[in-house]
Image (cartoon, helix red, strand yellow):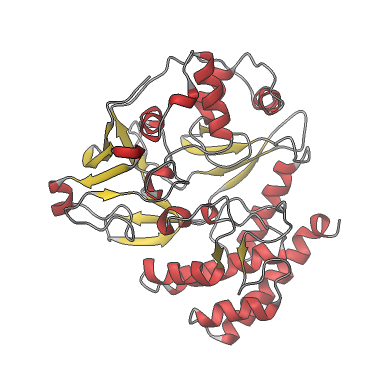
Amino acid sequence: MKTDKVLQVLYKERRVGTLGMGANRKIAFAYEDDWIENGFSISPFSLPLKKQVFIARKDYFQGLFGVFADSLPDAWGNVLLNRLLKKNGVDVGALNALDRLAIVGTSGMGALVYQPEYKMEIGESRLDLDEMASECRKILQAEKVENLDELYRLGGTSGGARPKIMTRVDGEDWIIKFPAHVDGKNSGEMEYKYSLCAKRCGIVMPKTRLFESKTCAGYFGTKRFDREQGEAGKEPKRIHMLTAAALLELDFEQPSLDYHALMKLTKILTRDCEADLENMFRRMCFNVSAHNRDDHSKNFTFLYDEGTDEWRLSPAYDLTYSTTYYGEHTTTVDGEGANPQEEDLLSVGMKAGLGKRKCVDMMAEVQTYVREDLAEYLET
């Protein structure tokens, strides 16, 4: 397969702009004139709304700006896509970032879509969740699977490391996760309990659920916040979203962020929304108290509301017991990654403009609920 070296970027069937492959595989983007007149900046810091050819300078987004890299699958999604491409005789090494965006087409996270879309012929099967989990396990162990098409159809454009599918349940869009090879058998139950505890801690969460299994305690599911259910019989509304990694053009696979920066980002992007600042502070406290150290820059997202022309912090996600290969938080707390203390948390909150008394109360509330609800995971 091969693109025409040009892709159109669309939002709700309106043309936003054009992506083009330039010299040295550098990728350029330019807004449409009409979008400049009537649209919004799809990436406020990197792509201001003006007539200009923007050229990406970073290498770790495959030559793309972060907003477009957010549309691409990573980790699990790439595993599935590369397997399926090889199965169809495509030279994976020859694909560039525009080719991969063309494969994403209309199926990516968020609201942006890409044309012309490259569609692969994908068959369907009717696997239950336990069968899917088994097939995912085989893929992670580099074994041959019989239902690759179905797994790609359901999860090939997803992000994150854990195997997952994106599907509809009772008319709503959900993401359902399966254990990775390094996870415990009941990792789904653990993430579900973490989600319930996070809600109790005052953290805004999407609807979550533990889906039944005959082989484990259940599979963790979370309702997608980049889709909003519309009228019966109509496609759900797509919500424009940007991760902190995309907004700040950061390599999420490298420790490159401190919660000071996340609080500042929240303050600037949401125009000093106190509710969002407090929620970001609570997430920091929760991640420290509940030992969620894989708190990288792609695990924080902001949603755009076209009606009010406002950005808001998205509901929280990927909250579970986790560590990193170097044993520290990916996002440091006042410069401390290995063992953040209360004074570090307090420093972040107060420098963001939250009062000391409020910070102390939020820290205590989070610590209390984490100790009560998650002790079984934190005492091992």
Looking at the image, is 68 positioned above or below residue 353?
above
Q: Residue at x 28, y 61 (%)?
A: 308
Residue 215 left/right relative to 237: right
Nearer to the camera, 261 or 127 = 261
Q: Write down the quadrant of residue 78 in the picture.
A: top right
Q: Quadrant of the N terminus?
A: top left
Q: Quadrant of residue 181 in the image? A: top right
223 lies left or right of 27: right
Q: Is residue 230 visible?
A: no
The residue shown at (61%, 19%) is 127
Above or below for 305 versus 281: above
Rendered residue at 46%/17% (across/down): 90
Report x, y in % for residue 175. 55, 38
Residue that extends furthest to the right in the rendered view of this protein: 380
Measured along the vertical axis of the image, is residue 366 above or below residue 294?
below
Task: Please say whether residue 233 is visible from this viewpoint.
Answer: yes
Query: In the displayed structure, would residue 376 be above or below residue 158?
Result: below
Question: Residue 42's x, y, as percent?
Answer: 30, 52
Q: Which quadrant: the C terminus?
A: bottom right
Q: In which quadrant of the rendered view does residue 111 lie?
A: top left
Locate residue 369 relative to residue 105 in the image: left or right. Answer: right
